[in-house]
Structures are given as C-alpha cells and as structure tokens.
Amino acid sequence: QVRLVESGGGLVQAGGSLRLSCATSGSTASINVMGWYRQAPGKQRELVAQIRTGGSTKYADSVKGRFTISGDNAKNTVSLQMISLKPEDTAVYYCNAARFSGNNILYSYWGQGTQVTVSS
C-alpha cells in the first residue's frame, strides 16, 4: 500500500505561480511512474505530467513550457512547479503513484487532491 499526501494548492492570480508537493510513504519500491492529474468541475480527470524512474517526463500539451514535474528520491516526494498560471488551470490536482509494465498500468494509488484556483 502506498500513501500519498498532496500540499501546496491555493488561490493565485493569473500569471502567478504555485508549487505542489506530494509526499509518499509505504510500499513505494514497486512504483515506477509518478504523476499529477487534475479534474475541473464537469470535466474528466486528465493527466498533467508524469515522471518515470530514470527521470523521463511527459506533459499535457496545455501545460508544456509552464509546468515542471520533479522527483526527490531521498525525500520520497514529487513536485509540480507551475508558472504562468491561467484560469483554465483551475482544478483539483491529484498525485498518482503507479506501477507500469510498458504502457499498461498494473495498479496505482491516488492522493486526496489539492485545490488550485486561478483568478482572472
């Protein structure tokens, strides 16, 4: 079992920045992909950014160049630095820890989510 606890959400004006952090604990040795997802009201949850063991990253087109995902193995944390925030970035952001085999998810865990609100 893996426990994920997000922090760092809040209210920010358009153009501002926020940094989200996700602290992991438990049986993390099997996890090989960490990610951030978001869900806006009335919309489906979508992938924002992923980082794999080894450091390769993947971003949604809508956040490329503005968001950066990073991991700190020593602290068992994964972070999402967000700059140039837009009102359309408003959503609940969820941390995800997953075990992938190739492109197939074998299992994953979710945090409780943290609200990010960007005012215009």
Image: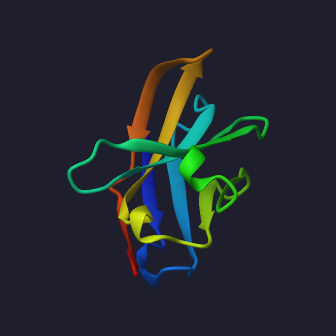
Q: Quadrant of the N terminus?
A: top left
The relative height of residue 11 versus residue 95 in the rendered view (above or below) is: below
Image spot of residue 112 (x, y percent): 32, 55
Furthest toward the front, the residue is: 120
Q: Tag count in the figure?
A: 0
The relative height of residue 6 versus residue 31 in the rendered view (above or below) is: below
| Location of residue 120 by image quarter | bottom left
15 or 76, which lies in front? 15
In the displayed structure, does residue 43 sit left or right of residue 93?
left
Q: Residue at x 61, y 60 (%)?
A: 79
| Location of residue 115 by image quarter | bottom left
Image spot of residue 111 (x, y percent): 38, 51
Q: Residue at x 38, y 66 (%)?
A: 90
Image spot of residue 28 (x, y percent): 56, 38
Image spot of residue 48 (x, y percent): 52, 48
The relative height of residue 83 versus residue 112 in the rendered view (above or below) is: below
Furthest toward the bottom, the residue is: 13
99 or 116, which lies in front? 116
Q: Residue at x 53, y 51 (%)?
A: 24
